Image (spheres, rainbow, N blue to C red):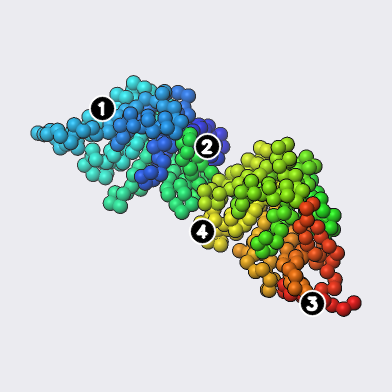
Amino acid sequence: MVGLSRIDPGVPGLSTVLHGGFVPERAYMLRGGAGTGKTVLGLQFLAACEGSTLFIGFEEPTENIRRNASTLGIDTDDVSFLDLSPDGDAFAADASYDVFGADEVEGDAITAQIREAVEATDPDRVFIDPMTQLRHYVRDDYQFRRKVSSFIRYLTDRGTTVLFSTQPTGSVSDEDLEFICDGTITLAHAEKGRTLEVTKFRGSSFASGVHTARVDDGGVRVYPQLVPGDHDIGFTSETVSSGVAELDDLLHGGIDRGTVSVISGPSGVGKTTTATHFLVEAAARGEHSVAYLFEESAATYTHRAGAIGLPVTELRDRGALDVREIEPLGVSPDEFAADVREAVEEDGARTVLIDGVSGYRLSLRGEDDDLVRELHALCRYLRNMGVAVILVDDVASITGDFQVTSDRISYLADTIVFLRYIELTGELQKAIGVLKKRTSDFERTLREFRITDDGIALGDPMTRLRGVLSGSPELVDD
């Protein structure tokens, strides 16, 4: 709906999912099991408000809530609290009710306390944690829905934006509350970590799907799924040189901006070193480049580069080349995509290396289809942003049957450069070739490949060899 005003939910990334934030003076439900971050998110919602706020808590003492918020860096000094959690005296008390049932008497008392707190604070935002606790103070489900509906109407009519948590159990559902609220947000634990999903947002569009959520310093942070179609800029098509004349000759100039290049081959053959030449050459020209390392440390990478004359350390010190070490089991694809977006949109990266595909796959903790889907979205985004993308892909076969790429990713590539081991006259050698390049022609010969003290070196075309891709070539007479 066009023209709706929005308010900041106080949770980084959530405004993106909600296409701008919460619509004020409405009520939103926050679902999730224990430990998913509901209370933390509710505190952030209140702390982000510039007006008055009220936290209505049914389960945890205010002192504990404030202390937990403080450890996460959430300031609750300006938040008013209504503590309705049971204390130790409730267990020992021997109270009796002569006329009304206990639930009715306690329910009326709690209603009075809530009304008094609301009128005293006149809050702009209220968080109720959890709303399902009110079920214990009414006779049946019908009365509960009426009670909650009346409560929400009472708050929103006063100009208050309401967020309330629920705790569904196997025997008691919270689905009836979905019909009462204007939006539903679900927090959960999944294989890839904490997740957030919006399933309802009345009067507005939102980013569908399951997004990554993380709780750390500052509270909950949301990492929205990457939607490539939302990002597109105009850019000038140009060729990115490797700085190695023979390799550029193979590629008829180099790789192209706004394309994806896969450098594939078995372990130790020189894939990362070859990719680094493109990064170093781009950085030396003043273009910002980024290397994401999934399979080795930044220290090892820079040391290896320096040993063969590639000035990675110097370019890092100048800020032209960024080397980021990624722990695949500690980051989700959504978090990694957010890091890449920051490098491209804020730091101006124009050449990006992802080394390698096997390590990236570990961050998915899923099936091969997940790898293809996530890599497709990331590469499509980078293409749209005019970035030259290089994927380093490790194939299993050392020699023998020719394997182009692993995990069915060859369709993502505009350009494929492959490296192979070959055995020739009792000596292990290496060969390099180009399998495809969509944006231009390329040299179809294979060349000898070596790593020297000055980087990579390519020999003359191997025109006198037959069967190079088998790993055991034969010399052909002139």
Residue 445 image position (x, y, % from top left): 82, 67
Locate residue 159: give its quadrant. Answer: top left
Identify the amino acid type marked 1: Ala
Disc nearer the start of the sequence (4/2): 2
Residue at x 81% of width, y 57% of height:
457
Disc nearer the start of the sequence (3/2): 2
Q: Give me the disc on residue 224.
A: none
Residue on which the image places disc 3: 474
Count of numbered circles in the view: 4
Residue at x 38% of width, y 23% of height:
122
Residue on which the image places disc 4: 366
Locate residue 368: give its quadrant. Answer: bottom right
Task: Please state if 281 lies on the left or on the right of 220 as rendered.
Answer: right
Measure the C-alpha gap from mark 1 to mark 4: 51 Å
Measure the C-alpha gap from mark 4 to mark 2: 26 Å
Asked if the residue at tag 3 contacts the one at tag 1, i.e. Cβ–Cβ closer than 8 Å, the answer is: no
Identify the amino acid type marked 2: Pro
Residue 309 image position (x, y, % from top left): 77, 48
Asked if the residue at tag 2 contacts the one at tag 1, i.e. Cβ–Cβ closer than 8 Å, the answer is: no
Residue on which the image places disc 2: 12
Badge nearest the viewer, 1 or 4: 4
Residue on which the image places disc 1: 112
> Dot 2: within a 10 Å radius of its alpha carbon, few (fewer than 14), some, or many (20 or more) residues?
some
> Dot 1: within a 10 Å radius of its alpha carbon, few (fewer than 14), some, or many (20 or more) residues?
few
The quadrant the C terminus occupies is bottom right
At mark 2, the secondary structure is loop
Badge nearest the viewer, 1 or 2: 2
Q: 157 above or below 467? A: above
Task: Please state if 97 lies on the left or on the right of 308 as rendered.
Answer: left
Badge nearest the viewer, 4 or 2: 4
Task: Please state if 434 lies on the left or on the right of 75 as rendered.
Answer: right
